[in-house]
Amino acid sequence: EQPSAPSPISAPLRELPWSKGRGSINFLHTTDTHGWHGGHLKEAQYSADWGDYISFAHHLRQRADEDGSDLLLIDTGDRVDGNGLYDASDPKGKYTFDVFKEQKIDVITSGNHELYLANSSIREYDEVVPDFRDSYIASNLDIYSPKSGKLEPFAPRYRKFTTKNSGIRILAFGFLFNFHGNANNTVVQSVQETIKEKWFQDAIREKDVDLFLVAGHVPVRDSEESDLIYKAIRNAKWDTPIVFFGGHTHIRDYRKWEKKAWGLESGRYMETLGFLSINGLSSGKRRLDATTAKSPVYRRMYIDNNLFSLHHHSGTNHSSFPTEMGKNVSEKIEKARKKMNLDEAFGCAPQDYWLNRAPYPANDSFLSLLDTHILPDTFTAALQKPSIVISNSGAIRFDIFKGPFTIDSTFLVSPFTSGFRAIRNVPYGAASQVLQYLNNQGQILLEDLVALSVDPTMYKLDDLTPPLPPVGLHTLERVTVAGHKAFAPRLIGRSESEQILLVNGDKDAPALPGYTTRDDAGSDGDDTIHQEIQFYDVPNCIAANIHFSPSSNKPLVSEEHAELRSRQGGTVHLAEGTKPETVDLVYNVFVQDWVLLALQYLGHDYGKEATEEVLEGQTMTDIISGWVRDNWACEGEK
Ligand SMILES: Nc1ccn([C@@H]2O[C@H](COP(=O)(O)O)[C@@H](O)[C@H]2O)c(=O)n1
């Protein structure tokens, strides 16, 4: 782990469901790592780095060699965008690729983030694909070759191989979901079309396959793409076991299609090392008898990526765990971080701000910080006229922790290179409705949130201190329920019936906060028994009003009047409660197509030519770091 990483905290662990002996295969799976190969430096629970993963895999490979099973490693894409280690270098990824390639990965695919920008996909094609020449698979992805200019497969379409110890014959695919946001130097063919192709139809009919392995940057659940692939394989081979490794939705999940087809998704940001094992497979070396042939057994575990877990599951300790290669890789990461000054602070956050671990709006919601402070402060200084500034919440990727906000933090919270654009003088009536169109699902109801939570506790109003504000959801740091001592709820709400709902505020819960996953195999998949963290849905987009606050029903101010004031004083700042006749509609470029579409629905046709750059191309990363520098001094600097 990195020298500045916090030491892991011991917690109750479940045992790794390892499968041993012939006909057994074990997998480790990473997905959506988004550049976090240095691990989490502010969260002890996820503090192991890529070097530790290399050491861990080494010990498990050795275990497989000893007991005759096999260990394979899978990575299903989105390795880029989201961490200083990748994003802070020029070109991006200058240090990550060398670190990443030191792990032996048996099946690897591309995600959507490798393809947003032409230069990222070219680097992926020129560097990562050759680094993983025998294992990179691109079943539905092509690239206009930077050398020949011709459209070529990004990597081989599939791979057939036999495992080293057990002799299990695997046929592996590598898919990406039907992604449309890629730059025009790559082509993602839809899964619907791909599975009709001859090469695919021939591949699923190949003889001597003991296991179909579908690695994909595709969610395992609620995904038309995964279901189509499953059905296509089953149409050709009614009984051959299938295993899916998915990604993209950043969750831990394990889905059962049927007893011989399961799929694992292994979270995000190097928080999780997914583990899956199957025993009872046939192989070139081992014919199964009638009973065992019917019953391969699949099991899974989500390993928290920290040394406490990794030592435990590999039967090692502090001194026997690190391998030479693992240590070298950790050192390489440390050097790269130093070279890029990733620990240099712009300022210090006075408290935690959560992206999904707090409801929105709330005092500890990052999105509330954005729409009530960061965007208004930045754009009030930069824009002259009443404006509405819209950003997608997806532009924000991670939480802010109390303490130093560093160069690294800027990329953790928002790594993207898109800037902001404006459409001038949009009638206020239309502009003020765009946000609603972009968030078309309306407000989240108390009932919806409660339905998502486990065992909400109901209390009477009188039993609670402090008393609650009116009906709705609230964040309170501590509450006291009559007859119990004070404790911290994850969510508290007051319903129409005047009862108080206290969600996940169980004072007897385990101490270490973390994931508690419920999947198709039950709720025992997380290796660490956690105190459950509540995650909240947030709107697609948020907005800030600049130079006006339309909270009352004062009349719209006429454009002429605004013009006049503009000429007189430069900036037009309307009096509290006054609505402008027109506003400049400013938005993050990523949502441009949706903003134009919403305006079209609202009866105003604007083309891209009607838009112009604002803030001289500054990105959300620049905006946040600039705001932190100006507003959050560290102790001693005040
Ligand atoms: N320039 C960009 C690119 C992407 N986004 C946001 O990221 C989302 C996709 O990320 P996943 O990890 O879910 O694949 C995308 O939907 C956008 O919200 C962005 O804001 N700007």
Image: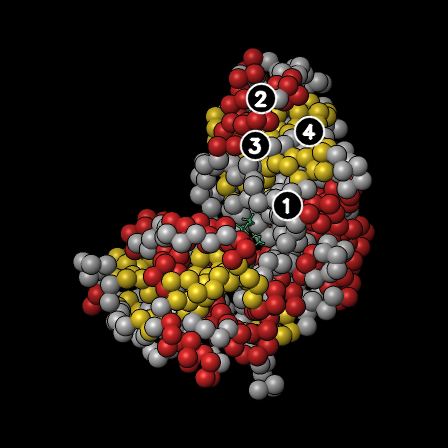
For the residues bearing labels 2 and 3, Cβ distance under 8 angstroms: no
Residue 38, image x, y percentages: 68, 57
Residue 579, image x, y percentages: 33, 71
Tell me which residue sits at (52%, 32%) in the image: 225
What separation in Å lies between label 2 and label 1 (alpha carbons)?
A: 25 Å
Mark toward the start of the polypeptide (4 vs 1): 4
Residue flagged by tag 1: what amino acid is it?
A: Ala
User: Which is in the foreground here, disc 3 or disc 1?
Assistant: 1
What separation in Å lies between label 2 and label 4 (alpha carbons)?
A: 14 Å
User: Which is in the foreground here, disc 4 or disc 1?
Assistant: 1
Residue flagged by tag 3: what amino acid is it?
A: Ser
Mark toward the start of the polypeptide (3 vs 1): 1
What separation in Å lies between label 3 and label 1 (alpha carbons)?
A: 16 Å
Residue 542 vs residue 60, the one in the foreground: 542
Task: Provide the residue designation for mark 4.
Answer: 157
Indicate which disc residue 183 carries.
1
What separation in Å lies between label 2 and label 3 (alpha carbons)?
A: 10 Å
Mark toward the start of the polypeptide (2 vs 1): 1
Task: Provide the residue designation for mark 2.
Answer: 196
For the residues bearing labels 4 and 1, Cβ distance under 8 angstroms: no
Which element type, helix, strand or loop, lies under badge 3? Answer: loop
